[in-house]
Image: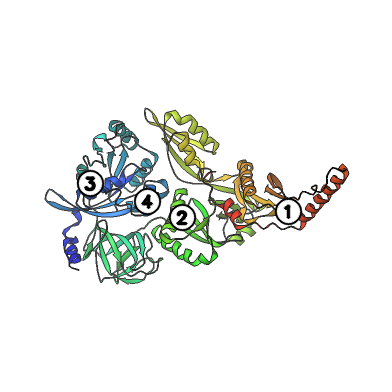
Amino acid sequence: MVFIKILIEKIDMSRFPVENIRNFSIIAHVDHGKSTLADRLLELTGTIDKTKNNKQVLDKLQVERERGITVKAQTASLFYNCEGKQYLLNLIDTPGHVDFSYEVSRSLSACQGVLLVVDANEGIQAQTVANFFLAFEAQLSVIPVINKIDLKNADPERVEKQIEKAFDIPSDECIKISAKLGTNVESVLQAVIERIPPPKAHCKNPLRALVFDSTFDQYRGVIANIALFDGVVSKGDKIVSAHTQKIYEVNEVGALNPNEQPTHKLYAGQVGYLIAGMKDVTEAQIGDTLYLHKQPVEPLPGFKSAKPMVFAGMYPIDQSEYNNLKSAIEKLTLNDSSVTVYRDTSLALGAGWRLGFLGLLHMEVFNQRLEQEYNASVILTTPTVPYKAVLSSAKLIKEYREKEITIINPAQFPDKSKVTEYLEPVVLGTIITPDEYTAKIMMLCQARRGVQKNMMYIDQNRVMLKYLFPLNEIVVDFYDSLKSLSSGYASFDYEDAGYQTAELVKMDILLNGNIVEELVTVVHKDKAHSVGKVICERLKDSLPRQLFEIAIQAAIGSKIIARETVKAYRKNVLAKCYGGDITRKMKLLRRQAEGKKKLRKVGNIEVPKDAFIKVLKTQPDK
């Protein structure tokens, strides 16, 4: 207990007036050294000890360690002495992958400035551009940092010119560092204090705090990460959530340093955590405003909710695990609020959910976290994208209660006779590549129904291409194809660009003439044949053979577009014929064929569950 007391006395948050506080994020493309720079800043300010083991200290999740990427934005408070003044620097380390851009935009709401990290070897990449514009739209101060100057092929001067051309930031504002070796990192802290403004906050106003992240602790309930815009919060205060209107008593407040350290109070302009006995996972909504009981305030604008780009069905492997999986998904969606959840049932796979994700990597990471953190094993179906249909008659509009319906489950796709037009989601993709790969990449984009919007050279040998893509063309394997075409040098990023009309068709899969509900898919008319062929081939490999022939067909309406046949088991009826007349053999074969024909009429095909799983599951090799 004595040890904790010393800690509490050590961090007296009232020593930091608003003008001595700086809140900033580190943003960059994947693998440009954000987390390594965060490690050096933590070491420089004495937040963590200098040891050889300090590698991506803020990447705490097992999935982050394994994949070497940042998935969750992490907060840390640093205490720094400069010219005799004690400064409080709140740092937020953000993910770099396009699928986690929602984490970045949320983190920026708690900041007044950003460090834009660019690799001195790779230069500006697609996600660098996207993240810069997120910060620019939020009107934050941007400090460009050129990292990895210790590499043999580093060319910081070239990168300076790129930054000047792409972002209009003068090259003399760039700070050249090596985060790995710690070269010139001190000047980054100086720039943060000089160039980033303090937060606009007042301690005398009533409390107004924004919840920008939250996690669930089995013993203490919900731990909310908060940014204080006004007022003071301390242990024992009665606070109210603007979202649920419930009243809570604050059990603990503190700073993240980078681990939780309790303090007496948190003051306006500061970033920290708060525990207030919220036991239900639905209570600490991200974007919620907290205020003192009997002192209501205008709620903060919060965040616009994330728009799911990819939907996939998730089912427990065994239905008895349904309730455990339900609570695991609830706890994980509290920590990752960009996942949307809808109840769903399937005849073959039982009760489950249809989950909306921001991308394919997001889906994989979510699945991996379920397995690692909650020991839940699940079946994930092939990802689909949300389509829309514009209904034709007033009667149908009355039935559905809207003119434009969104379809997230292909089985509910309306018939062409009920619809005036179908719409598919489109995205604006940005590709940055060395110019020798431009021709190959353009051919790939055209094959994926892409429409070129812009092409710009950002220096002598690097091109930025902008394409409008249908989302379903890029969602599964576009990124892999792009990387293999460009020897790994091209980078890709996309943003939502609304919907466009498309010739979509509903494709049924038939087994001996009977439609299989679970395998219904929505495809573009031009791609129907190739997709149907792949599904039929996959089914042929996974269906067990019967005593009669099974015809696997892909059909659009009544037109069959692809077919595979699972041959029947057959007994060798000619085994007893040693020599003899041909008519005798023909008679036996004819009798067998008739028997098979009769069996096929009465025989019922039970599709085993593992065959469904093989066909519906995401295929890593396809």
Task: Looking at the image, tell me whether mark 3 or mark 1 is earlier in sequence order.
Answer: 3
* Residue 253, image x, y percentages: 26, 65
Quadrant into which the C terminus falls? top right
Compared to 67, does 433 lie above or below? above
Q: CA distance from mark 2 to mark 4?
A: 13 Å
Q: Which residue is mark 3?
A: 192
Q: CA distance from mark 1 to mark 2?
A: 39 Å
Asked if the residue at tag 4 contacts the one at tag 3, i.e. Cβ–Cβ closer than 8 Å, the answer is no
Q: Which residue is mark 2?
A: 367
Task: Looking at the image, tell me whether mark 3 or mark 4 is earlier in sequence order.
Answer: 4
Q: Residue furthest left?
A: 84
Q: Secondary structure at mark 4?
A: helix
Residue occupying image coordinates x 53% and y 60%: 317
Q: Which residue is mark 4?
A: 64
Type of the residue with mark 3: Val
Type of the residue with mark 1: Leu
Q: Quadrant of residue 124?
A: top left
Q: Which residue is mark 1?
A: 547
Q: Quadrant of residue 462?
A: top left
Task: Looking at the image, tell me whether mark 2 or mark 4 is earlier in sequence order.
Answer: 4
Task: Looking at the image, tell me whether mark 1 or mark 2 is earlier in sequence order.
Answer: 2
Is residue 324 shown left or right of residue 105? right
